[in-house]
Amino acid sequence: MKVRFAPSPTGWLHVGNARPALANWLEARKRGGTFTLRLDDTDTERSKPEYAQGIEEDLRWLGLDWDEFFRQSDRLERYAAAAEKLKKAGFLYPCLESEEELNFKREQRRKQGRAPIYDRGALKMTAEQLERALANGKQPYYRFKLNTRTVSWRDGVLGERNVKLPSLSDPVLIRADGSFLYTFTSVVDDLETGITHVIRGEDHVTNTGIQIDIIEALSGRPNRIHFAHMPLLTDAEGGQLSKRLGSISLRQFRRDGIEPEAITGYLAALGTSRDPVAGTPRDLIRDWDITRVSHSPARFDTKQLLALNRKHLHGLDFAAVRERLPEGADEAFWLAVRGNLDLLPEVRDWFDVARGDITVPEQPEERDLLRAALDALPPEPWDEATWPGWTAAVSGATGRKGKALFLPLRRALTGEEHGPDLKTFLPLIGRERAAVRLRRSIG
Ligand code: GLU
């Protein structure tokens, strides 16, 4: 079994293409196959080296690795050879119509109530007409002559699918400047590199009909490649996700401090009936089953992703995050704060609360309570018994209980209304800082 993930380096990876990337990787790893990363970079105008590099970085960040790598721009002579073969066999024919001419013809057909597909006018061109045009400096582009049949396949996700080729225009495979289009280069590569399974987005279903026809023309035998299309993702409201690509790029999630395990866990469960569980791609292999992916569009809800991220952080061991914590943060600190994080970078603020100098609100109306608390501060060393013992003493001295007791103290000690359990967090603050903050809060 051999699969490929084939992004075009014309933008950053986002969750819409990370999902088929992960699906391909999981299939390969689950079934002992080969996973190839292929950069579809024949569109030289839109492809950028920084995107190519960014794609590799983002895939690695997600935890995906690949067994083979190549870029299409290194294989131009292979495409030229394959094109020659198709030309000789009469599958590729030269065209000269301009964009304006094609638009005009499309409009005419529409007015006549016919499907606005290409009328194959170029096939009626005589050899002399073509020669004269070439002599006048015209450059032809080439279309592939589609069969007049319906292409059917059993889709690995969508089930029985078919595409009626007669209702489509013959696709352009070679531009007038001699460059090749993705529809063609992809088929050449899939055949020549021995791809057995193509897993990609549902937006490619029509392409698959066309590409199966090209595969058969090029290889001279029935198609053997299995196709599976992942239904498109929508946003939480069911709208198009593609409108907000920037906000769902892997780069942006990484910058925001989302853990890659939350993204891979979320993507692997999307569209299935399973609850997402955060995990590295390797953790997800066991439960992965592409046949459980639903036919209908899946909602990508950033709120759910964030909830999964939170849950994941709350269970992480110190060893897993140690290198990403502020200098000096120890295990006790991590265990005290991890349950209060939505995103790991927030840990910085809690570290300042534990070990740094923070501003706390003045609470003149709580003066008596805070004074009593200051007077009752026990000597160090402090441990988990300190907070209950101290607050019991303050309660005894002031008669305060519950929220009326705890909230002003929490505000004075941390500057916040909510936060880590003070039983574990107070010893991290220590007596000196606690005393300073209580005095400041008294005003
Ligand atoms: N470069 C194509 C894309 O990004 C690849 C599609 C495919 O997997 O064949 O849409």
Image: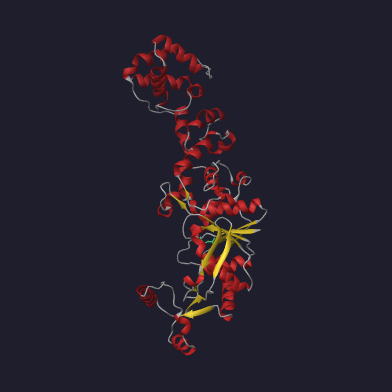
Instruction: Measuring from the top left, give residue 23's x and y in whole percent.
Output: 57, 52
The N terminus sits in image quarter = bottom right
Residue depicted at 48% across the width and 63% down the height: 47
- Vertical arrangement, residue 196 with respect to residue 291, above or below: below
Picture layout, residue 379 above or below residue 344: above
Residue at 55% over, 68% down: 151
Identify the residue at image location x=31%, y=18%.
Answer: 365
Can residue 198 be seen here? The reply is yes
Residue found at x 59% / y 75%: 81
Foreground pick, 324 / 300? 300
Q: How is the image coloured?
A: secondary structure
Q: Nearer the viewer, residue 72 or 297?
A: 297
Residue 377 seen by the camera: no
Residue at the extreme bottom of the image, as rendered? 128
Nearest the viewer among 412 and 6 is 6
Q: Position of residue 392 (x, y in %)?
A: 46, 13
Res 400 quadrant in image? top left
What x and y, as percent, mark residue 208? 54, 65
Q: Quadrant of the C terminus?
A: top left
Taking depth in this image into account, of 319 and 236 the one nearest to the observer is 236
Residue lying furthest left: 365
Residue 290 appears at what percent x and percent y? Answer: 59, 51
Judged from this view, the residue extending furthest toward the top is 397
Q: Residue furthest right?
A: 32
